[in-house]
Image: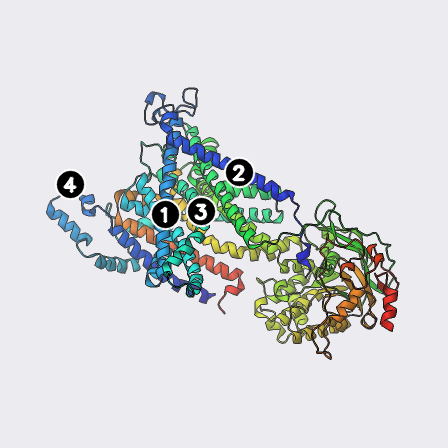
Amino acid sequence: MLRLILQRLLALVPLLFIVSVLTFSFTSLLPSDPVDLILGDTGTEEQHEMLRERLGLNQPVHVRYMQWFGRAVQGDLGTSFFNSVSVMGAVMQRLPVTLSLTAVSAIIAIVVGVAAGIAAALRPRSWIDRFATLGATFGQAVPNFWFGLILAAIFAVNLRWFPATGFTPISDSPWDWLRSVILPSIALGTSSSAAIARQVRSAMVGVLQQDYIRAARAQGLSARRIVLKHALTNAMVPVVAVLSFQITVLLGGALVVEQVFAINGLGTLAIGAVRQQDIPMIQGLVLVMVALVVVVQLATDVIYGLLNPKARPS
Amino acid sequence: MTGSSTTPPHGPRQPRRLLVASSLIATMATGVLVLLGLLAVFADVVAPYDPLRQNLIEALQWPSSSHWLGTDDLGRDVLSRLIHGSRIAVIAAAEGTAIAVLLGVPLGLFIGYRGGWWDWIVMRIVEAIVSIPGIMVAIVIIAILGPGLHKAMIALGILYSTSFLRLARGVVLAEREEVYVRSARVIGASDSRILLRHILPNIAPPLIVQVTLTVGAVLLSEAGLSFIGLGVQPPDASWGTMLNSAAAFMDLNWFLAIPPGIAIIVTVLAVNLLGDVIRDSIGRGVAIAAKPEATPTHSGKPAPAAVAEPVVLPRLKNEVLRVENLEVMVGSGAGLPIITDLSFSIAKGETLGLVGESGSGKTMTGLAVLGLMGAGLRTTHGSIVLNGRELRSLSQKQMEAVRGNEVAMVFQDPTTSLNPAFTVGSQIAEVLRSKQGLSQKQAWARTVELIDRVGIPRAEERARAYPHELSGGMAQRIAIARALSCNPSLLIADEPTTALDVTVQQEILDLFRDLQGEFGMAILFVTHDLAVAADICDRISVMYAGEMVEMAGVDTLFSAPLHPYTRGLLEAMPHASDRNPPLPTIRGSVPRPGSWPTGCRFSNRCDFRIKGCEQRIPLTGTDRLVRCIRADELALEAAQ
């Protein structure tokens, strides 16, 4: 297993490198001069020149990249153009917020999706199967942020069961934390749960027809054990393979859903950075996002290996 | 295996109903999209108000006769803004998708054709883009271009071009293999021209499918970007920006969020559903082209079920299993018989062979005893008595207790009948724990014992192996160990040696004999191989088209077969002493259920057929049974 992890980690190094080159060269294409952005019309020609020097903007692109990369490897993603906070600090401060939404919505999506998928697969063409199929079709058409608005209107504004806005860190109060993330996470996770349900259903239908399932039945094992252990373990293999994609989608969705609930996460940071053309912030955000996706991919690869003995390097 | 011939035939009603449903969905979805298009074109005429006209006195009104969908925070008419928003939606979907196609397809074709470094670099970039959440990619591109509808659509176009790029590249790579082989013969035309001619027809179907997927995704992404203020800019009316302002006034007028939300859902739903229908029809075209063989239609007259006189089986000493007049049906309604009038019994320590060609119903008989025939199949008549208890009247739960403890089964392919996700030892131990209530430790000790007993060296170590790490013969030994773990009185073996090498076959047969000596279980041995049956069985029952045609002790059957079908099988058997090809074969093949001849089911393949064969033939005899009206004559003939 350790070997599998190391193998996957090594394979991810070029990806991170290419992403860093891409984001750096992309953001160098920004049409406006950051110095003009920061100083505006104020300041003398001399002050402009000094700032340019300080930001290292008078050096060629590849030199700037090398400097940026060298610092990024040490965890220093530079300083925001606008409020001189460190990019790493700003990102790390918002990261728990976005991670909370992503993680809770992923748990909701997986639990609901797997349960619905199994129920649908066990009784094809029954009402639960039709309902799950219909739900999957609908789930992919409903915008997560709109669903969030509706949930907020009903459960926060009207019934007052949950706070309508804001985020409580888990370290302050785990209960309030859960209450603050549950609505956005449902809004976010529903369409993924529909997609996962579809995957689980089709994988499960296939697995239930396998010889080893019939053999387990012939051995008199209980139906529950056969479905939940023998069939599900195998049905999850193709599902886990697409799970990292779904979690990437959730991570992106969190950026938007945060706005509905006025939660101050990476989404708010990103939107602000785009509006102000805060280059170091955008670069840092993309890199952190990719690092997160890489960690998720690694985790799903390991789970894949655990579920599927054939995928383990021997 | 006889499984393939017994899948429940789908009635013609189900597909037609689905077809009607899908064409109804397609019509409705098309209707919605046409309406949307018309609204977009004629928005200025249809909309009751100017979508930008503010009236702060009438702000945040609920629906009324003058404002059907109410007014927003600046007193603008929601219905008019919704109608104008449809124009943005149409432009966004068309623009985003068009950019994605026009950027992705040519680039994909190019790198697929050029290959080499071009391909490598572009594909690494694509991988990098795909690994970032889509909305973040769009946000970065908007950071460069600035916000606004068209700029956001360029961003989405770039984002979604990656899937078109990969699609086009895949088609080129698949086609170029084929074209290079063929182009060796075509002189004159250049490779690239041939390639292009081959690619265009092949790329169209997946391209259409991808376009429908992309249109829905672009619509949702545009709404999202406009919602967070990076897409369409106020005061222009788009469904996303409408939701943006609705979000701010949710506690004052929640209804503001409803119309744009419904508009987005209905539109995306219509696009997706239409896409599903298109996908299905493209898929169906492929399926029909690839599989011209139509599913067999059974003629109107159903084959007669059990009309023959029931045979009274003599009761055996120490009888374990007794099956009487068993009938198995497939399908709904009246159903189609696949096994009729089947009777046999097996005693303790005895091995009964069930022999016949594939499609004769042998495997189904074994599964019927276990109550595991599968969906659409049911026993409709007769009795199955195991250790003095009628199994047909048992509940699911009771059958579960019988399986494993009283009867177990070994299947044809050992590599697929063991679960690939668990070690072989844990699969045996699991049975011992759940059926016999052994503790973890006891179960494991007993498992290792069993594995050792079935002749696997280094049992402790092998118990920790996964099925794919074992050879076929070894895996079958494990399957046998699992089946015998609870000491069942009946073991059903379904072609247990067919999937194995010839040398291993003999070892497994010896193992069966050996274990039977020790455990004393009765064995129902299903096989198509008479040589194997001769080796292991005490008695043999020959099956043909869902019924038994002959049953006799193994020596009697081989020396003096009574039924013409048995004779045919014996003649088709290769003998070591007789090396002169060709082997005689029985002409034709086993008729499928539903197309059985009305009289003797073998009559259309039989050389001895007479007029009397057109009636149902009963099974006759006491000790040895045969279902042939000319059995006596033929026996005489054989004796001469």
Residue that lies at the very extreme toward the front in this rendered image: B188
Q: Position of residue A222 (x, y in %)?
A: 67, 55
Q: CA distance from mark 4 to mark 2?
A: 59 Å
Q: Are marks 4 and 2 in contact (CB under 8 Å)?
A: no
Confirm whether residue B88 shows in the render: yes
Neighbours of disc 4 within 10 Å: few (<14), some (14-19), many (20+) = few
Q: CA distance from mark 3 to mark 4?
A: 51 Å
Asked if marks 2 and 3 fall on the same chain, the answer is yes
Neighbours of disc 3 within 10 Å: few (<14), some (14-19), many (20+) = some
Q: If you read the primary sequence from the N terminus, does the residue marked by circle 1 or circle 2 appear first?
A: 2
Q: Which mark is residue B159?
A: none
Q: Which mark is residue B100?
A: 1
Numbered disc in front, either 4 or 1:
1
Asked if marks 4 and 1 fall on the same chain, the answer is no
**Residue highlighted by disc 2:** B25
Mark 3 chain: B
Residue B563 lies left or right of residue B446; in this view the side is: right
Q: Secondary structure at mark 2?
A: helix
Asked if marks 1 and 2 fall on the same chain, the answer is yes
Q: Position of residue B5 (x, y in %)?
A: 68, 56
In depth, the one of B402 and B110 nearer the eye is: B110
Q: CA distance from mark 2 to mark 3?
A: 18 Å
Mark 4 chain: A
Q: Amino acid at mark 4?
A: Asp
Q: Secondary structure at mark 3?
A: helix
**Residue highlighted by disc 4:** A41
* Residue at (64, 62) in percent of width and height: B430
Q: If you read the primary sequence from the N terminus, does the residue marked by circle 2 or circle 3 appear first?
A: 2
Mark 2 chain: B
